[in-house]
Image (spheres, rainbow, N blue to C red):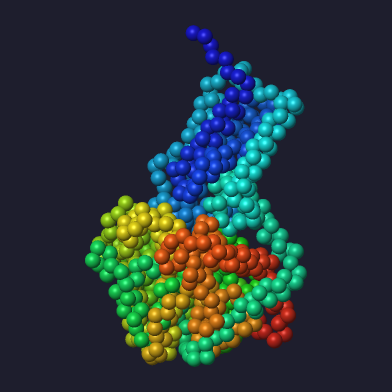
Amino acid sequence: MKKIVWPKHSVLIIAIIATWLTTYFGYLTSFKMKIDNMMQEFILFLNPLSFLLFVYGLALFMKSTKRRNIYLLSVSIITSIIMFSNAVFYRFFNDFITLPVLFQTSNFGDLSSSVTANLHLTDIFFFTDVLIVFLAIRFIPEGQRSVQRGKIARKLYFVVTATVMMVNLGLAEMERPQLLTRSFDRELLVKNIGTYNYHIYDLFIQSKSHAQRALADGSELVEAGNYINANYAAPDSEMYGVAKGRNIIAISLESLQSFVINEEMDGHVITPFLNELSKDPDTFYFPNFYHQTGLGKTSDSEFILENSLYPRNGSAVFFTHSGNKYQSMAEQLGQEGYFTNVMHANNRSFWNRDIMYNALGIDKFYDLESYKVGEGEAVNWGMKDIPFFNQSVELMKDMPQPFYSRLITLTNHHPFDLDEEDKLIPEYTSNSKTLNKYFQTVRYMDEAIKVLFEDLKASGLYDNSIIVMYGDHYGISENHNKAMGMYLDKEITPYDNAKLQRVPLYVHIPGYGEGQTIDEVAGQIDLRPTILHLMGVDTKDDMQLGADIFSPDHEPFVIFRDGRFVTDKAVYTQDVCYDSETGDEIEMAECEPFIERTSTELNYSDMIINGDLLRFKEEQELEQTPPMKGYQQQQ
C-alpha cells in the first residue's frame, strides 16, 4: 500500500479548519441569532477565521514539534471551552459572556442549579475539534509535518490573516455601519466579528471603562448634569408627599413578568391575589412598566431602584463598581430619618451585596443569618417566600420607624423547582420545561404576597406603610419563544420579545382610596424619583435619569440596556421600528428621534458610573451633607 504523503503544516491546517467549522456549526445550533440575508450568513461563516488563523499561526514561531503540538491542542481546548461556556450562558441569559461575569466566581456555587439545568448532552459537540486535533497529532507522521519557519512564509501567512480580518470588518461595516460603537449589542458584535474577536473587543471596552475613573476630573459631571436637569419632571402637586412619614416596604418580585397578570393557564388563575390587588382602590397598577436590567439581573434591578441610573453593559455594577460614591435612595431616606435595610434570605456575599450595600448607605442587611430555615423551607439557594415573609414581618416589628425595607424574593427563580406541597396549580404542557414550571412558582409567589399582606395587617404595620412591588427582570427568555408562542397563541416576533419585558408595578397606599390602573409607559429607572416624591423628598438636584411616573411631565420612553426602546407609539428593536399597539412595521422616522437619545442617555449613565463622577458632587456638598451610613454588621 502506498504511504500517504502529508503536506507540510497539515496539523496546523486541520486545527484551523476543525475549530472554524465547529464554531460555525455551534453558531447555528446553540445561538438564536437573527440572520436577514445571505451576506449576514457569509459574515457569520467567515468571522471566526481571522482569529483562528492568528492564534493558531503563532505555532509557526515554535521550533520544537512537541511544543507546537501541545500549543495547537491547548488552543483547541480553550476555544472549545469558550464556545461551550457561551452556549450554556446563552440558554439562561440569552446573551454572551463578558469578562466581568467570568470573574464573578462568588456566584457560581449559588447558581449551580441554574447552570446544571442548561447543560445539554449535545454540548460535547463543542469539543469535536479537540478530538480531531489530537488524532491529527497522533497519526500524521512526524517527519511529514514539520512547519516551515522561513521568515517569508510566516510573513505571507500573517498578511493573509490580516487580509481576512480586513475583509471581515469591511463587510461587517457595510452591513452594519458604526458597528464597534454599539458595544451594548453583543449579539450584533458576535454576528459580525465572531465570538473570539468579540471577547478581545470586550477586554478593550472593560479596560477603557476602568481607565475612565483615573482620567475623570469632574468636568464630565457638568455635561451629564445639564442633560439631567433639562429632562427633570416636576412632581404632581396632588401626589407629592402623599405617603410622607410612612414606612416604605419595597418588594422585588423575582422573575415576574406581566404576561401572567389577570390571565389563566389551562383554566387555572395564575395570580389571583395580584389580580385583586390591581383593582384595589388603594393601589396604583402599571401594566406598561418595563424592567431595564442587564446581565446583573436582580442586582441590576436593585441598582436601578436605588440610583435611577442604568446598569453597566455586560457586567454587574455590584461587582465592578462597588467602591464608587452613590446618591442612593437609601441614603436620601436615611437623611430623612429612615432606618434603611434590605431583607434577603441568601448569602450576604452573593452579587457582592455585603460590599455594595455599604456603598449605597444601607443601615442593615438582614441576610440568611437573620432567618431560621426550618425543614422543608429551603428553596434554590435560600428560603421559600412564605416563611421568608413571615419572618421578615416579625423583624419589622422591632425596627425603628419610619423604616425603608427592601425585600427580595427567591422562590420564582430559574429553574423554577417546587416541592409537591407548594404546587397550587398543575404544570403547563409545552416543549419547555422552564415555562411549564414557571406558572407554578408564580402561583406560589402570588400566595406568598397574600400572606405578607395578612401578616402586615396582623402586625399593625400595614396602615402606616406604603408597599411598592415590582418585577425585577424577565423569567422566560427568548430561548423559549416557541413555548411562549404556544401559550400566547401567536408567533413571537422581535416586537413581542420587547413587549414581553414588561413586569408588574404596584404602588399600594393603604387608606388612599383613589388608586387606578395607569397605562403610562415607564421603567424601573423611574422608581427612585417616584417613591421619593411620594414621600415628599425633593429630587430636583439629584443625578438621576428617571422621572416621577405620576408627574404630568413624565415622558413615555423606556430604554433597554441593549439599545432597544419603547415609547407610547413605537417599539425599536433589531434596527426595525414597530407600531407600539399593533406590532406592524412602520416608518423609521417614528423611531429616529429616540435612537440618538437612547445612545446619549446610556452613555451619560456609563460616564457617571465608570468615572465615579458622584465623588466630585460629594466633595462639593461635603460641608452640608451628613456622612454616608453603612449597614451594621450583624453580631
Total labels drawn = 0
Is 125 or 402 nearer to us in this picture?
125
Q: Residue 606: in sight, yes or no? A: no
As displayed, is residue 473 above or below residue 52? Answer: below
Q: Is residue 35 left or right of residue 151?
A: left
Which residue is rendered at x = 36% and y = 53% of the image?
482
Rendering coords of residue 117 (x, y %) = 39, 52
Q: Quadrant of residue 449?
A: bottom left
Rendering coords of residue 432 (x, y %) = 34, 53
Is 218 or 235 nearer to us in this picture?
235
Which residue is rendered at x = 60% and y = 80% of the image?
232
As displayed, is residue 50 above or below residue 356? Answer: above
Rendering coords of residue 631 (x, y %) = 56, 76
Which residue is rendered at x = 49% and y = 67% of the image?
570
Which residue is rendered at x = 64% and y = 50% of the image?
201
Q: Residue placed farthest to the top in the image? A: 1
Rendering coords of residue 436 (x, y %) = 31, 58
